[in-house]
Amino acid sequence: MITASLLEKLKDEAVKILRCNDLGHATKPAPHLYPHQWNWDSAFIAIGLSHIDPDRARQEILSLIRGQWTNGKIPHMLFTPGDSEYHPNAAFWATNHLPESPDTIQTSGITQPPIIAVAALALYNNSNDKKAAFNFLQAIYPNLKKNIEFFRFYRDLERDGLTYIIHPWESGMDNSPRWDRAMQNIEMKWQPQYKRVDTTLIDKKQRPSNEEYDRYTYLVEFFRQAKYETSTIRKNCPFLIQPIMFNSLLFASLQALQKIEKILNEDTTDIDSLCQNMEKAVNKKLWDSGLKRYVDFDLRLNKAIANNTVASYVPLYAKLASQERAELLIDSLFSRQHFWPKNGYPLCSVAMSEPGFNPARYWRGPVWINMNWLLIHGLAYYSFKDKAFELLEKSIELVANYGFYEYFNPLTGEGYGSDNFSWTASLIIDMIEKYQGNEVFDKLTDV
């Protein structure tokens, strides 16, 4: 049962986790497993921090921006100086001599789901000092706009309104079954040499396989040899996918940037046009009328990827689906056969009906709090308020019962991956704020 004292205790624990994981300039995702700054992690973290420490939340965003390349890309990793054990480390990525990369910090060479604009808008919405929040938006607006332009000019070479990714790590869902076929099709022209650190800290049954890591590393070596040159990668990279979740979150960022431009009294014409084109493209190319859900598209194979995973439902968060399509999606999302175990916890990251479902292995089945957070917003927007509230309560209950883990077994609730995980803590803070303020349906849809 969720009580006021339980919520207070949970929030106190969450704040302590964020403080403990604070690097000073940014927040690492976890104490030992992830020692650097990650792109979409920090965006989620900033949302939670906006409730408890607005200055620190702004610093989180500013820290991400300091790693932005001249082409607008915000890398998926910004490296902490002196910590070289993580694989692949800064030396392995070898981006520091590129003309596009920043001079003062070492970064990876790929990106992640772009939700920095969503986080920036949340900071403004949650701020009691609107003048300071306005000044912050004004200061970072050029960076937010340039990040959007990166995807427009460098990742939509099909000119069909959709963005593609070049590595599973860019998706945020590294070992999702959605990538299996594309990864298996990679012809390994050499065997990468590296040493994994993650499986010395976490049970290997909860992590991507060695075979998957070989291909992850192979792709990084390919990018390095290509000097991260866009046309070379577009021509020769064996992994080119237009993912539904990534594009949905990009669309949500476009919407957030629209609102930011209105706050700043900027011209929204360009973003308005991008939104219209992208909404049409997603609903034309990435909707499967037979499966009655959204899918990914493999540009190398020129065909859709049909796996039923939680990613197919993120268009609800981005407000991309019609009401009719939303109802079809929500029927599946709440199915006891797919994403909501009868005596367990929602939402499975892969449908239990899928052959690749594994309740313990990373993005192949476990519950992730950030996915629940996204879908709570989506359910509320489409007026499924009871279901939104039910998912909110189950998410809080899961963390209260099993801890602030990276991900959870949907059948038992057992926590997996790293404990004291920052975005779990941050998003629980955000959920508690909305739960306590009885604003779950008013404010959720405004982020």
Image (cartoon, rainbow, N blue to C red):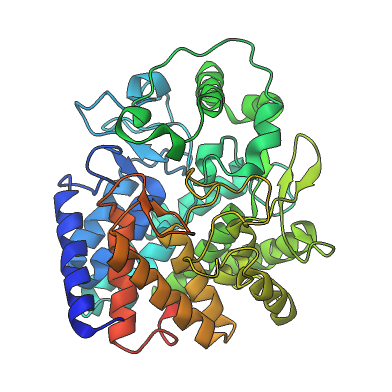
Q: Let me know if residue 18 appears in the view.
A: yes
Q: Position of residue 28 (x, y in %)?
A: 26, 45
Left or right relative to 312: residue 71:
left
Could you tell me which residue is drawn at 27 percent across and 49 percent down?
419
Left or right relative to 387: residue 333:
right
Q: Position of residue 152 (x, y in %)?
A: 60, 49
Looking at the rendering, which quadrant does residue 254 occupy? bottom right
Could you tell me which residue is drawn at 55 percent across and 29 percent down?
212
Front residue (pair 187, 6): 6
In the rendered image of this protein, does residue 291 appear above or below residue 210?
A: below
Front residue (pair 278, 328): 328
Front residue (pair 256, 35): 35
Q: Let me know if residue 321 appears in the view.
A: no
Could you tell me which residue is drawn at 83 percent across and 65 percent down?
289
Q: Which residue reaches farthest top?
A: 190
Q: Position of residue 186 (x, y in %)?
A: 67, 24
In the rendered image of this protein, does residue 230 appear above or below residue 406?
A: above
Q: Position of residue 362 (x, y in %)?
A: 47, 44
Looking at the rendering, which quadrant does residue 434 occupy? bottom left
